[in-house]
Every structure is written in C-alpha cells, then in structure tokens.
Image (cartoon, grey):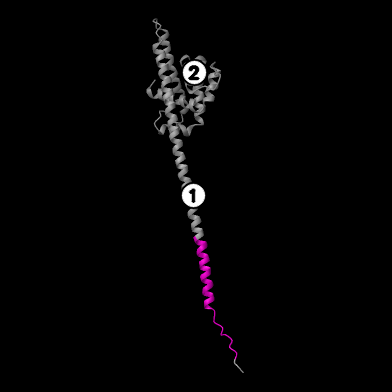
Amino acid sequence: MTQEQYNEAINLIGHLILTASDALRELLGYYGVGFESAPTKRQLIDATIELLTSDTDGFTDALSKLVDRHIDTQVESMIWLRKVGFDLPDAEDAFFGGLIKGAIGAIGGLLKKKKRRNSNNNSGNSGASSSQALQAKRDLELQIQRMQEQQRRRDEERRREQAERLRREQEEKAKRRTQTMLMVGGGVVLLALIGVAVFMSRPKTPMYNPVKQ
C-alpha cells in the first residue's frame, strides 16, 4: 500500500473513533469485543487494530462499510480536515465509497500480510507483526490528538466569529437607535420652530384703548 493510502485509512478510522465511538463500539461488540464501561479512545484503537490484524469474519470489510456510512453525515468535516492538511479521500469524489474501502482494505491487508509472514517464520519471532500493529496504534492515537486540536481551534475561531458578528449587530442596533432618537429630537425641534414661526407671523391685533368721554 502507498503512504497516502495508509494515512487516509488511519485518518478515517481516527475520525470514526473521535466522532462516532458508539457505532464503532457496537461493531466491535458484534465481533466479540465487549467493554464493561464506556471504552477509552485507546481501548477502541487497540481493539480495532487487533481485529484488522486478524480480520475475523470479514471485519475489515464491515469497518469499511461503517466508515462509509459515517462519512455520509460528515462530508463538511471531511472537506475541512482535507483543507487543514489531513490525508483523506475527496468527500466530493463520485467514487468516495470505493476510496474508503480501498484505504481501509489496504491497511487491513498490510497488517494481515505482516501476520502471515510471521506465522511462516520458523523462528517464532513476532516482531514484524507486533511492530506494525503498534505503529498503527501510535499513528491512530497521534492523528486523533491532531484532529482534536484542529477541532478546538475551529471551535475557537467560530466563537470569535460569532462574538464579532454579535458585536457588529449590537453596534448597528445602537446606531439605529441613535439615528431614531436624533430624528425624533429633530422633529420636535422642527415642530417647535414652526410653532414659533406661526405665532410670530400672526397679524398683531391693536390693543383696545377706550376714549375717555
């Protein structure tokens, strides 16, 4: 498999663990992996990689289908993660489902290949298989941490944008109130001036001055 395929598979699985752990837990349970309480991300990572390595009853294919369904509701997130540097299949690609299946299948094939090589090794050294699995687990954990950090930054940016939008709205409301008050005040002054002008323009009536008889 290529490095890009490996990275895509790690990121897809990592995103699933980070945002849809319940769905993954249900799938793991179907394949015999149970948890007494809510599993940690590390536990989900370990269980997923172990099942990919053994590929019990077609787990790799089932995981691919789960990721595909999950991503259908996370297209915006996938596009954003690609923009910030994560290797992921193009969510807008017409063959996105096939790309997901290819990436997940490739990493499953890689882990199984290492395991088969190890089983054919008469020395009984399990270093190659366990080393690849451990590396995959470390990479998953690292990418999940990166995604969490990027999500934190994205949330902060959204909060700043929202705060700035509210500030502009409040300033606009204050500006409109001021304009309204000025208009009302100006109208009152204008009416007063008109009243004065009307009063001053009235013809003066001569005062009655009775002639003494």
- Looking at the rendered image, the quarter that the N terminus falls into is top left
Would residue 79 be seen by someone viewing this image from the given angle? no
Q: Residue furthest top?
A: 122
Q: Residue furthest front?
A: 212
Residue 170's mark? 1
- Looking at the rendered image, the quarter that the C terminus falls into is bottom right
Q: Residue furthest bottom?
A: 213
Mark toward the viewer: 1 or 2: 1
Q: Residue at x 51, y 20 (%)?
A: 62
| Label 1 neighbour load within 10 Å: few <14, some 14-19, many 20+ | few
Q: Give residue 19's position: percent from left, percent from top.
A: 50, 28
Type of the residue with mark 2: Ala
Q: Residue furthest left?
A: 3
In the foreground, 181 or 134 = 181
Circle 2 SS class: helix
Q: Give residue 133's position: percent from left, percent from top.
A: 42, 16
Disc on the earlier residue, 1 or 2: 2
Tell me which corner region of the image, top left, top right, bottom left or bottom right, holds residue 126.
Answer: top left
